[in-house]
Structure formats: structure tokens, C-alpha cells
Image (tube, rainbow, N blue to C red):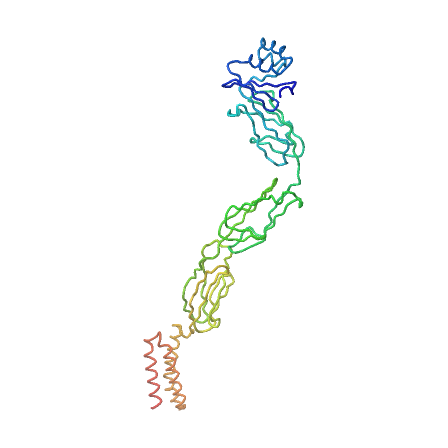
Amino acid sequence: NMNEYTNVQIVICSGEKEEIQKIDNIYFWYEYQNSLRKLVDTVGQYFLTVNTIKNVLIDLEPKEIERNEFIPIIETEFYIQVNPIEKIEVGERVDLSYRTIPSNIDIPNLQVRSLNPEIAIYEDKKIIGLKKGVALFEFFKNQENIPFQKMRIEVIQLNYIQKLEIAIEEKIMGIGHSQSINLKYLPIDAEDVDDIKWHFSSNAIEVSDGKIIAKSQGVCTISVQSKLCHADVTIEVKPQISKIILPKSSVKCDMGDKVDLTYEIEPNEVYNNQIEWKTSNSKVAIVDKDETGNHYIRTCGIGTCEIQAVAHEGTASSICHVEVESTLYKKENKNNLLGISVIFGILPIILRVFNISILICISSILVSICLGLISYKKVKRGFIWVLIAILIGCISIFY
């Protein structure tokens, strides 16, 4: 339908065969072996005034033809057109696309210039909308000074999110803990709320029904992205106590003793390092704190019990067996008992001198025997003196 056009643009391209193709309002002539004359003959079939043009074209060089504007001719080995972009949104990044003839050629280095850089720019082979308005772009081939194409792009401003914030209570959590998470955005009636995308850098946490649940030890960054805004927050999940190490597994002590309970935990870095102390018999021993905050076993009575350390979180625990003895069983006290036993053993001699009742003398002998038996456990050698004293006492009674 070339009769529909009064002005025709013909682009001459090199090709392997002679042919003409129509794309939009442009005719592409694939020239083979300098067939410009044949081109004019072909075009002349469709124009009434072509004879005049034909006669002129035959005698003119291509550049003269272009200057006289009889038929606009572009002398090049290829044709390139940037596909139009009518509208983009503020913050949107759009790739440029091209159409070339022949289609299999490599796109040359193109220079793109924005005449309104405050509205839209060209960066990293993308058109980027900055603010509402209209931007004009010019496209240049290689180092040419005249643009081969111009483009008008409208940048539109939709009601998108302008500010994003992830609100949480704590940035450090323990395994099994949970906390609420809220996504705040402005304006509250933004159109792209349903398009917000979430991303989690690891499986240390899980988000469900507005809550963060700490699943395993590690670090996780939560990121949210809307069309224009981005926000993120990093959460560290620390482990629970896996092991409690007490200084001793069993302790034997006397009434009134304080036994140190300086303990260690594994791993060293945990979310909650608190330990709960339990006793199987609070009448025998309990765990207390001194002025510096260190734990110790405080004896309450004679007997045995178990002191258990239990982690506040997790299943870690450790047990210490405690045996509390009377202070009478201390060696130094047993030596004293031995001496007292000897004294009570020979006391009847003195009592008999003053004619004291035989019953009192016998009682003294019995006391000597009891104290001697108590001290016998650790002071066996000294017990012979007790026996001698008892023997002397007995002789004095019956004498």
C-alpha cells in the first residue's frame, strides 16, 4: 500500500540478495553490488513524480540525494531502533530493548542522554524513574553527535509505600523463645501492600501469625521489599545450656561447713545462663549465696541429701551427693573426747576419797566408756588410755 504515503523513508542496508521490506512506515532496501539504480526503478513504480526523481538520482551521489531530501536515505550497514517506553513508575527500573535489521547483528555501543535527569536517568542499561514528570531521552550511535532517535517517557507517581520499618522487641533470642513482629509502613493506604516480599537469610527463625519463633542457633536477617522501599533487621539466636559442671560429684562435710559450688556451663555463650538449685532434704543442706554472689552448700543438719543444679532453660542438670556429719567426728574434737574420757575414767578415784556415792562413780565410768567409743573411730591408739582409766576407776570403786 505504498500509495498511502506521500513521503517515503528508505534505508539502504547491505545484504546477500536484493530485496525490499516494509516495517512500519520505513522501507528497507537490501543492497547487493551497488544496486542503487535498481532501487530507484523499483520505487518509481509507485510514484507519479518518480521520473523526475529518477533522473536526478541517477546522476547524484547518495550524500547529495540525502541533502536534497528527495528520498531520505541512511547510508549504514544496519538499522537500529529503540523500542518505545511510554510510562514508568517512580522508582521503577526498565531495561531498554532494541530492534535491528538485520536481526543477527551485535548492538553497538549506544550513548543515552537524559534531557531531564531530575525526572529520569539512564544507568546500568536501565531507565530509572526518579520523580513524577516527563523526561526526554536522546540515543546516539558510538561517537555520533546527532541522535538517531528521541524518546519521550512519562514518569508517574502511584500511591506506593514510602517508608518501611520492621518492629521487634529483641534482637537476641533463645531457642524456643518467641516474640511479636510488626511491619509498619506509610502511607497506610498504599496500593502495593500486597506486593511486599519477605526474605530470610537462614532457618534460625520462623515467622508465623505475627510471631517470630527461634528454631536453632544462628543469625538470621529478615528483609522486606516493596516497590520503592526496603527494610531489614538481624536477629541472633543463642543456644541453651547443654551441660553443667559442678566442682565435685560428692561432698562429705561437718556441721557448720561452707562448701564452694563454683560451677561451669557449656557452651559459654548462651541466651539464659541462670541455674536453679534443688535439695532432696532441706534439713540437711541447701544452696546459698555469699556477699560476692558465689554459690555454696550451707549445712543445716546431720544426714545425707542430693544437691541438684538445673538449667532454667533446656534439660541440662547435675547432681552432687552431700553427707553432713557432726562436729564431734572431727579429729581434733575426737582428741578432746579422748582426754575427757580418760578424766571421767579416773574420776571415781577422787570421788571415793571423799566418800561420794558409788552410783555417781559408776556413772562417771559409763560416761568415760561412751566418750571413748566415740573417739575410738579415728584415735584408736589413744583408746588404750581410756581402757586403763576405766580399769583404774573400777578398781577404786570396789576397793
Direction from residue 265 to residue 47 in the image, left or right: right
Most foreground residue, 188 or 375? 188
Q: Position of residue 27 (x, y in %)?
A: 59, 20
Q: How many marks?
A: 0
Q: Which corner quadrant holds the C terminus?
A: bottom left
Looking at the image, residue 81 lies above or below residue 352: above
Most foreground residue, 152 or 295? 152
Most foreground residue, 397 or 259? 259
Q: Position of residue 357 (x, y in %)?
A: 41, 91
Looking at the image, residue 71 lies above or below residue 343: above
Q: Which corner quadrant holds the N terminus?
A: top right
**Image quadrant assignment for residue 52:** top right
Looking at the image, residue 219 lies above or below residue 349: above
Q: Position of residue 380 (x, y in %)?
A: 33, 76
Looking at the image, residue 29 lies above or below residue 85: above
Q: Position of residue 17 (x, y in %)?
A: 50, 18
Most foreground residue, 393 or 138? 138
